[in-house]
Amino acid sequence: MRIITIILLLFLISCKNEKPDKSVYDIWETYIESHSEFRNMEMPDYWHFHNNREDANRLAELILSGKKRAMSEPYSWYENGTMELDTIGAKHIIIDFDGKAQAIIEIKKIDTIPFNKISKDFAVLDMGTDIEPLRKWRKAHWDFFSTAMEQDGKKPTEEMLIVCEWFDTIWKKNSTNANKGYNK
C-alpha cells in the first residue's frame, strides 16, 4: 500500500508541477466567467480516472454523458495522511488521458461504507451502467484494490471501508466558448 500511496502522491505532485494543458485553464476561466461567485477561488485540482488511456477516456466520457456520478477508493489511502479527503462542495477538473479538460465536477456527498455493504444504486452511479452494476463494481474494485494493496503486503477484506463520493458534473467542455476550441 505504501508503494501505491507514494505513486499516487508522485502523480498528484507531478500534475501540480507539470504545467496543465491550456484547456484546463480555459475550462476554469469560462466556468468562472459564467459563475462570478467563484472568481476568487483557486483553480481546482485536475486529474483523470485510472492509469491507462482506454479507461481514463472511457470514464471521462461517462462523466460527460451524465452516467458516472460517483467514485470510490479505499479509506486506507487516507489513513496515513498522504491524501486528503474531499469536502462537500470541492471541485475537480476531469481531464482525459492526454490532459485535455473534459468537465468540472463538484462533490455533493461523501460517506464511508464497508466494501460488502456497497449498494446497487451506488454501483450504478460509480460504474455508469445499470447492467449488473454491483457485480461489475465488486469485481473491478476488488481486482484493483487487491493489486494495489498487494504491493504493500496487504489484502483487501469484505469489511474494508470505502470512501464513496457522489458528484454532479457542473461544467462540460461543450459548455465553454466555441472560440476556445472545445465544442465538437
Image: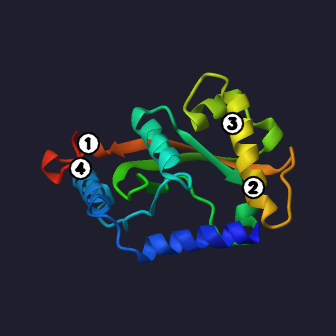
The C terminus - image quarter:
top left
User: Is any part of residue 36 visible from this angle?
Assistant: yes
User: Is any part of residue 75 visible from this angle?
Assistant: no
**Among numbered discs 3 and 2, the one appearing first in the sequence:** 3
Q: What residue sits right under mark 3 in the picture?
A: 137
Q: Nearer the viewer, mark 3 or mark 4?
A: 3
In the rendered image, residue 66, in percent from the top left (x then y), is placed at 44, 33
Label 1 is placed on what type of residue? Ser
- Residue beneath the point at 34% across and 45% down: 171
**Among numbered discs 3 and 1, the one appearing first in the sequence:** 3
| Up/down of 149 relative to 165, above or below | below
Q: How many marks?
A: 4
In which quarter of the view is residue 129 placed?
Answer: top right
Dot 2 crowding, Cα within 10 Å, few <14, some 14–19, many 20+: some
In the rendered image, residue 149, in percent from the top left (x then y), is placed at 78, 60
Which element carries disc 2, helix, strand or loop? helix
In the rendered image, residue 123, in percent from the top left (x then y), is placed at 65, 33
Of the pair 105 and 64, the residue shown nearer to us: 64
Of the pair 34 and 83, the residue shown nearer to us: 83
Q: Nearer the viewer, mark 3 or mark 2?
A: 2
The N terminus - image quarter:
bottom right
Do the residues under discs 1 and 4 have CB atoms within 8 angstroms?
A: yes
**Among numbered discs 1 and 4, the one appearing first in the sequence:** 4
Q: What residue sits right under mark 4 in the picture?
A: 34
Q: Which mark is residue 147?
A: 2
In the picture provided, is 67 more to the left or to the right than 146?
A: left
Q: Nearer the viewer, mark 3 or mark 1?
A: 3
Which element carries disc 1, helix, strand or loop? helix
**Among numbered discs 3 and 4, the one appearing first in the sequence:** 4
Measure the alpha-carbon separation of dots 3 and 1: 30 Å
Label 2 is placed on what type of residue? Thr
Q: Which mark is residue 175?
A: 1
